[in-house]
Amino acid sequence: MNTLSFKTKSANDATVTREWHIVDATNLTLGRMSAKIAAILRGKNKPYYTPHTDCGDFIIVINAEKVQFTGNKWNDKEYLTFSGYPGGQKAEIAKDLVRRRPELIIERAVKGMLPKNRLGRAMYKKLFVYAGAEHPHAAQKPKTLTF
């Protein structure tokens, strides 16, 4: 048996092929959808996944305002922001945040599931979230992704 033929192929920027996917967030649970989106942004759905390389695809999320929560999270879940100044911490419940900025809920959920380093920041830039059904990425011919 020739053991030299068993070589692990490591993906790099030249060998990675990226595709565009579109996700309709209508009536999808936020956490379950975000976990699947984060896995695709990392590239874990590809056979040549390499942890130290950005091999993920581009994701477009439409209808972000129609995402669902389980249980009583619409009233209980709080999103915190901090300005850096004393007394500068603000809290906003999910129901108010989805009314004001519906894209932010999905963006924060996915960003929290990505690595906290420069590789994770590069993966996060491939996520595009829109509140309505319209998006400006028709030229990329995205494929529909269903969960």
Image: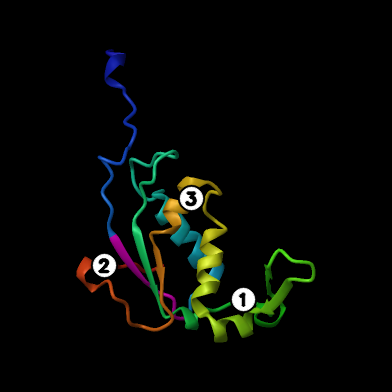
Residue at the disc numbered 1: 70
- Residue shown at the point (65%, 81%) measured from the top left: 74
Magenta stretch encompasses residue 33: no
Residue at the disc numbered 2: 142
Mark 2 residue crowding within 10 angstroms, few (<14) / some (14–19) / many (20+) = some
Of badges 3 and 2, nearer the viewer stands 3
- Residue shown at the point (79%, 71%) measured from the top left: 87
The C terminus sits in image quarter: bottom left
Disc 1 on helix, strand or loop?
A: loop
Q: Camera-side residue: 67 or 4? A: 67
> Is residue 100 visible in the rendered structure shown here?
yes
- Three-letter code for the amino acid on which mark 3 is drawn: Gly
- Residue range in magenta is 20-26
The N terminus sits in image quarter: top left
Residue at the disc numbered 3: 120
- Of mark 1 and mark 2, the one earlier in the sequence is 1
Query: Looking at the image, how many numbered discs can be counted on the residues?
Result: 3
Contact between labelled residues 2 and 3, with CB atoms less than 8 Å apart: no
Of badges 3 and 1, nearer the viewer stands 3
Q: Position of residue 40 (x, y in %)?
A: 40, 56
- Three-letter code for the amino acid on which mark 1 is drawn: Thr
Mark 3 residue crowding within 10 angstroms, few (<14) / some (14–19) / many (20+) = some
Instruction: State whether the magenta stretch is mostly helix, strand or loop.
Output: strand
| Left or right: 91 as drawn, with respect to 129 | right
- Residue shown at the point (46%, 78%) measured from the top left: 64
Q: Which mark is residue 7?
A: none
- In the image, residue 68 sits, relative to residue 11, either above or below, namely below
- Find residue 49 and report its image quarter: top left
- Of mark 3 and mark 2, the one earlier in the sequence is 3
- In the image, residue 5 sits, relative to residue 37, either above or below, namely above
> Is residue 29 visible in the rendered structure shown here?
no
Disc 2 on helix, strand or loop?
A: loop
